[in-house]
Each structure stands twice: as structure tokens, then as C-alpha cells.
Image (cartoon, rainbow, N blue to C red):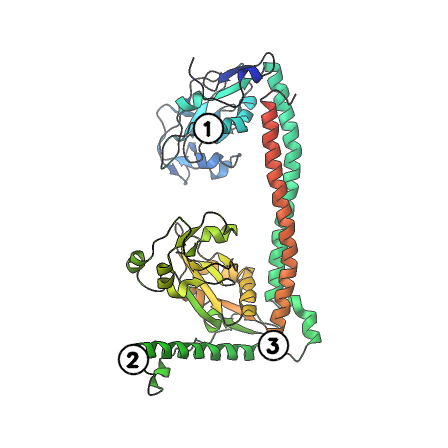
Amino acid sequence: MSKSISLPIKKNDLPSMWWLSTLGEISEKPQYGWTTKAKHEEGHLKLLRTTDITSGTVDWSKVPYCTEEPDDIKKYLIKSGDILISRAGSIGVSYLVNNPERAVFASYLIRFRPKQSMDEKYVYYYLKSPDYWTAIGASKVGIAVPNVNASKLSQVSIPIAPPDQQKLIVAEIEKQFSRLDEAVAALKRIQANLKRYKASVLKAAVEGKLTEEWRKQHPDVEHASELLKRILSERRKKWEDDYIKKYVGAHGHAPKDNLWKKKYIEPAALDTSNLPKLPKGWVWASLDQILILLTDYHANGSYKILKEHVKILDHDDYAIYVRSTNLENGNFEVDLKFVSEKAYNFLGKSKVFGKEIIIGKIGNAGKIYYMPVLNKRCTLGMNLFMLRFNEQLLSNYIFHHLKSGFSEKEIKEKIKGVGNPSIDKKEIRSLRVALPPLEEEKIITMEIESNLSLVDEIEKVILLNLKRAERLCQSILKKAFSGRLV
């Protein structure tokens, strides 16, 4: 008898008439899949891969065909009752075949065919249980790509109930899972509705529909064109101040004439001919016109120079190195990287103080984040852009605008590449925003944040309940294979 991989369940813990076996003992000899490349054009024989089974169901319309077919097709043909287990990538993920199309299984899958004395659904549900995943965790080998082989999987222990009890256990699992599935489906419907509601709030906001009544009651507010003029004036003044500061630093005195002012490049006026009509008092503007800073990690030198001066540290040091993973999860308490005081000062313009808009540059290109105020020194990580505006109110409004359907569509059109998508500064500067009068902007921002904060709270409750459903699912399986479900 082969040595089994240990499990939390021990033979003495099992009910009377149960016994402890292994996946190899209760199955026919396991088999590796067919090795060939997948092709997506029409063919004669489909190739079921790990990526096709990871969701738990198979969409046969998306399963590709074999580039080369095996000489002995029958050897690899899948049929109802086969259990396929991934040996690499999504290691340990299993799929119970039911009414398949004509297909063979790929080489990163291993087929286990339960013996006639076993209920294949009983085996399949066990392969979803916490005890199975504990065993799989103990049997991983390799470093770059964790994997298991047929021999390791064959050694995984499995508690066996008498055949009549197997059917009762499967029936009870499916009964309880059916109730859970209904509850989860309802939660996901609410999730989808909340997503649509968020989108509708942002759409109404940037089209001015959210403040239609407010505008009727405040007809004499300053036109947004005046706001844009001030922003452009402040933009020029900041450039001039920065130029003088650099000049003095280099020469020891201020420029003696005003010829240097001709070096300033005024942002191009926006062509609004193909843009939607805006409410009275609004104006279209490009991000280039209203930004005071657009920078990235490479702002102060080439990659080679940066590599010499900036070392990314795992231990707590002078400043947090802000990465997209922290922004994505909204968590700056765990999985942090740091830089030294010297590196922090070298990065200069990349210092992050909070309330900036962050945009993904490569990989997560076009993703929009809002930097929280951490009261800690922070600097921008790689593959991110940081946007800063002349006042916080404008920054808040622009953030919501960039999350709206209008901006999402525009950003998507400007992203280049597929495998490793990217967006550059020029494309970000060219993004267009509908700019309302300053007073109306304040009302819009308050309305958006009031609506979305309520949505965020509901979403937190939904996520909590979805996690609870997953734990309940695992609890049902735990009881099932310890003899306590029926």
C-alpha cells in the first residue's frame, strides 16, 4: 500500500463502517494529458486545458482545438465521470466532466477515473474540501511554478463512506449548496446593481444632471471659463517661479531680461467640435490645461541612474514606496516596501503627500487610484503616474470624472499594447474633462461622495456575506467527510 499524505482526519475519528484510503487506491491508474499547442481556429478535436476548468464550469465555445491530434485519440478522450486535476499553475483545481464535447485533455491535467464502487461526485466534492487542500499544500514541489504529479496526488488520503452513505452525503451537499448558491447569486445581483448605480451617479455628475435644480436656483455663479483662465494663469506663474529658482541656483542671480518667458509653452486650446454639449456655465478642458504636476518614478533620471540611487527595501526605513498593489487593495499596513532618506530626496518630484490622483502606467495602464493621507513619508513607485492640481476641490472632482464612463472609454482608447498595456504622459495630458463652475463643482463632489459612501458601505456588507458563504461551504464539506453531515 502506498504511503498517504497525512490529513487532519484520522482513521479513529471516522464513523463506524468508514475507512481511510487514497485517491490512487479508489481510482483507475491516473493519466497525464496530451501534449500539443492549442489553436483557436476551427478543428476536429478540442483540447481542454487548466484555464478552461478553473471557474468550475466549462464554456465549450471557448475551448480551443488541438494543433496536432494524438495517434490514439481514444486514449485521451474525456467522458462523463472523469475527474481532471491541474498539476501546475492552478495547482490542485479539479473538474468533474459531464456531457463533454469531443475533446482530449491537455498535458497539465491529470485524469483520475473513480472505480465503479465509488460515487464520482463523492470524490469530486472531497477534492473541494479543506482537508484535500491541506494535503495539496503539503505536496507542492518546485519553486518557479508549484506543481504536483500523479504519484503525489495518488497518495492524498480520502475518507471513504459506505456506498449507500456516499449517495446520501452527495445529495445533502448538493441540497445545502443549492441554498447557498441562491443566496450568493442574490448578493452578486445586488453587487452588479450597485456597480451600475455608481456608473449612473458619475455619468449624471459629469453631464451636469446631478445639479440641474441647483443651477436653476443659482443662475449668477461665475462661469467655468473664468476658473479655467485662473488655472492657466497660475500654471504659468508656477512655471515662471520654478524657472527663476533653477536659474538662480545655477547662476547665482535672477535672469536680467524677460526673454526666457518666451520658452513657456501654453497648453493647446481644446477642440470641442466633437464633444457633447455642456450645461450653461460649464467648459471643456484638457488635463494638460489644469494640471500643475504630472510625474512618474523616472522623472529625475534614466532607469540606470535611478537603479544606482534608489534601492527598494523590505524593512521599514525612511519612506514608503507606494506601489499599485497597495493602492489596489487600499491597504498601507501590510506588504509594504520602503526607500532610504537619500533615495527619497533623490526622487524629488515623486514625493507623495496624499490626495493626489495616481494613474497606472504599464501593466495596470489607465487604472485610477486616489492616494490616501498617511501622515508618513511616501514616494511614488514604478509604473505609476501622479497628478496634482492647483486646489484640492478640483482634484476630488477630476478623480470622480476619470472614474466616469466618459473618461474610462477615452482612457481605454489611448492604451497601447495587449500583453503589457501602457499609457504615456502625452495621452494623459490629452484627456478631456467637463469643468463646472467652482461653486457647482463643490456641490457635485459632495453629492457624489454622499451617494458613493452609502454604496461602499453596502458593498462591504455584501463582501462580508460572500466570504461567510465561502466559509459555510467549506464547513459543509468538512462535516460531510468527517461523517457529521448525515
- Residue for badge 3: 281
165 to 145, vertically: above or below = above
In space, the residues marked 2 and 1 are separated at their CA atoms by 68 Å
In space, the residues marked 3 and 1 are separated at their CA atoms by 63 Å
Badge 2, how many Cα within 10 Å: few under 14, some, many 20+? few
| Disc 3 versus disc 2: nearer the observer | 2
Q: Which mark is residue 136?
A: 1
Instruction: Depth check: give the residue in front, 172 or 77.
Output: 172
Question: Tag 3: residue type?
Answer: Gly
Where does residue 123 sit, x and y in percent of width and height? 53, 22
Q: Going by the image, does 428 lie left or right of 467?
A: left
Q: Which mark is residue 251?
A: 2
Where does residue 35 sit, x and y in percent of width and height? 35, 30
Instruction: Depth check: give the residue in front, 344 or 287.
Output: 344
- Mark before the other along the chain sequence, 3 or 1: 1
219 to 335, vertically: above or below = below
Badge 1, how many Cα within 10 Å: few under 14, some, many 20+? many
Badge 3, how many Cα within 10 Å: few under 14, some, many 20+? some
Question: Tag 2: residue type?
Answer: His
| Disc 3 versus disc 1: nearer the observer | 1
- Mark before the other along the chain sequence, 2 or 1: 1
Question: Tag 1: residue type?
Answer: Ile
Image point 46% across, 65% down: which residue?
387
Indicate the quadrant containing the C terminus: top left, top right, bottom left or bottom right. Answer: top right
Q: Do the CB atoms of the residues marked 3 and 1 lie less than 8 Å apart?
A: no
Image point 35% across, 63% down: which residue?
346
Label 3: which secondary element: loop
Label 2: which secondary element: helix
Indicate the quadrant containing the N terminus: top left, top right, bottom left or bottom right. Answer: top left
